[in-house]
Amino acid sequence: MTIYVPKGKIDKVKLAIDTLLHCIHKPVCVRSVASVVGQIIAMKLVVGPVSQLMTRSISIDILKARSWYSKIVLSDMAINQLKFWHENIENYDSRTLVQSATATTVVYSDASDVGFAGYIVNVDCVPSCGHWSSEEAKLSSTWRELKAAQLVFESLISKLTHPRVKWFTDNENVVNIITKGNMKQYLQSIALRIFDLCLKYCVELEVQWIPHCANQIADFLSRLPDCDGWGVSQDVFHKVDAIWGPHHVDRFASYYNKKMERFNSKFSNPGSQAVDCFTVNWKGTMSWIVPPIPRVIKPLKECCAAGTLVVPEWPSACFWPLICTKNVFISQIKDWMYLPTDKDAYTASRIQGGLFGEKDLTEVFQHVYRDELSDLPENVRALADDIPWVLSGARADSTNRKYQYGFSAWKRWAICNKISCDLPVSPLHCALYLVSVMQQSESFSSVVTTFYSLRYVHSSLGFVSPTENGLVKNVLEGAKRKLAKVVIKKEPITVSILERMYDDKIQEAGLPEIRLLSMCLLAYAGFLRSAELLYISRSDVVFCQSHIFVFIEKSKTDIYRDGAWIVIGRTHTKLCPVACLERYLDMAAIDSDSDQYIFRGFWFDWWIVGVKMKENV
């Protein structure tokens, strides 16, 4: 059964629209505009929800009028919607009451506080994933869920196998906005973009709400980290492109950090030419490569491809010997240059704590003391810029990074829940956040990190920390009991264990085995942690007749990094740490005046059946 809009009504509304279109960019009576909107929405039973979606911009203009007798100038978006109805209203003049066709393509999308994701069910294609910028993460959950639907749609639209698509989201507002539009312009513009894509690709989209528990895959994908999302600034790229370009393809990019229109991405992204650049031939193009470095050397050689490779100068990294051996670059590298070292020359990964990300309290410090800083003389204000840098020296870099991440997580939670982020944090808000972390964690360590992250920021900036409040302390103790697990203590290392290890390893007597024995005996005799052991250089060891001196440059207990010498004596037994170390250094052929670390990895050379020492850890 089919229902129709009478032809007389169609002609009447087209005539009214035609009259308004003749007055483009001129004042028109708001009552005439409202009449057109009312006539279109009156056809909703036949036309469907599009009658509301494609009149929202016109309604926004109507609300700007002071009275029904006022005149308004229609915005460009309102004019475009009038043109849409003038050209397409005949296409919506009938509707079949019983829809026989069913959707054969099913899509799920979701957005978290860090990113978005979506995927097509039962279709062999890479899902769409991405991360929010710091500004986007502060926007409402409705905006993020709606933007996620748009980005996933743009990324996967070429993979849709049927014009009828069933779209699942766990945000009810998104269902209404995509279907009917919204009076908020920033949400309406996204809904119109999705509608334009449906028209362009002839897609019939049906959006349906599902509970969050039924959308776990998309939620998991939206939280995937991307630690390789760093890059260089646009200025640095243009300077390099002017020397070695033109570059044709950005091989490791995303829609938000691409350096040119042609790019390859890890996941499906809007505008991506290919997903996973290792599945395409690089030959014949000049590639821009800011990659997971160890994986690109082989494709460049096999494809006989050309490109610019951006790498940190990091001789101790595992990838460095692939491009530089004995301080000489491999023959495939034709030219090289140093890039600027200032932080502005690079773009940080959008994931918190990624390479080139924030590592101090600069932003928080400037926000907290903004009023006092503005009153200072310019020469004194310059000194204030160094305060966050000095504060970072109060703790180890790893501790600063951990606490900065914990405090940033608090800020995101507060913003999402419309709670003030200003310092000092309310003890009640702090307690609520600890409970939230506890409910999402399986271990007590996450709650402890959160607790001390807030204490770190408050104490560093001179505030009384909410963690001193009795309520917060008791919440912490309660979380400790709730998340408590049975502790299985490790057995201490004993002489008998070392003897069994020695008897087992000494029979093979290769360099890897002697290295392991030497590390264990030296750590046991000197009470050394692994971090202290691995950072011992050959020049830090002085051999004497009855003992050795070992200089420990930095230690967990040496907060001021003064360094310390320790003495380890000769025992004249098979477990003598000094004798074992001498044997290891002799087998590894490490010079006595070398500054290289003594305990390093190996390169296994199967052609000569042996091992070679790496340049450093």
Image: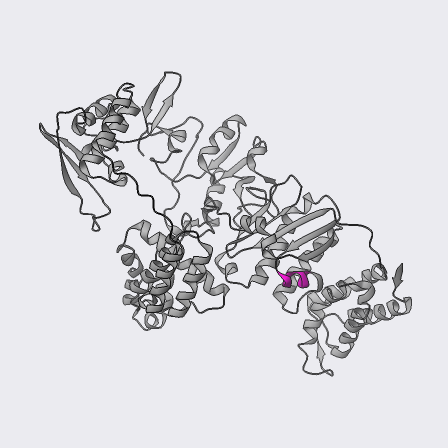
Q: Tell me what residue is drawn at x 18 percent, y 35 percent.
A: 525
Q: Tell me what residue is drawn at x 51 percent, y 50 percent.
A: 223
The answer to whether residue 577 is seen in the rendering is yes
* Magenta segment: 171-178
Q: Position of residue 533 (x, y in %)?
A: 24, 37
Q: Position of residue 385 (x, y in %)?
A: 31, 61
Specify the farthest residue to the left: 545
Specify the farthest residue to the front: 486
Direction from residue 145 to residue 485 in the image, left or right: left
Image quadrant where residue 538 sits = top left
42 to 355, vertically: above or below:
below
Residue nearest the viewer, comparing 75 with 367: 367
Q: Position of residue 10 (x, y in %)?
A: 87, 67
Residue nearest the viewer, comparing 598 with 215: 215
Q: Position of residue 499 (x, y in %)?
A: 23, 27
The answer to whether residue 361 is seen in the rendering is no
| Image quarter of the N terminus | bottom right
**Which secondary structure dominates the residues rendered in magenta?**
helix
Direction from residue 46 to residue 487 in the image, left or right: left
Image label count: 0
| Image quarter of the C terminus | top left
Q: Tell me what residue is drawn at x 63 percent, y 51 percent.
A: 108
> For residue 585: magenta?
no
Residue nearest the viewer, comparing 256 with 405: 405
Direction from residue 568 to residue 311 in the image, left or right: right
170 to 503, vertically: above or below:
below
Q: Tell me what residue is drawn at x 39 percent, y 18 percent.
A: 606
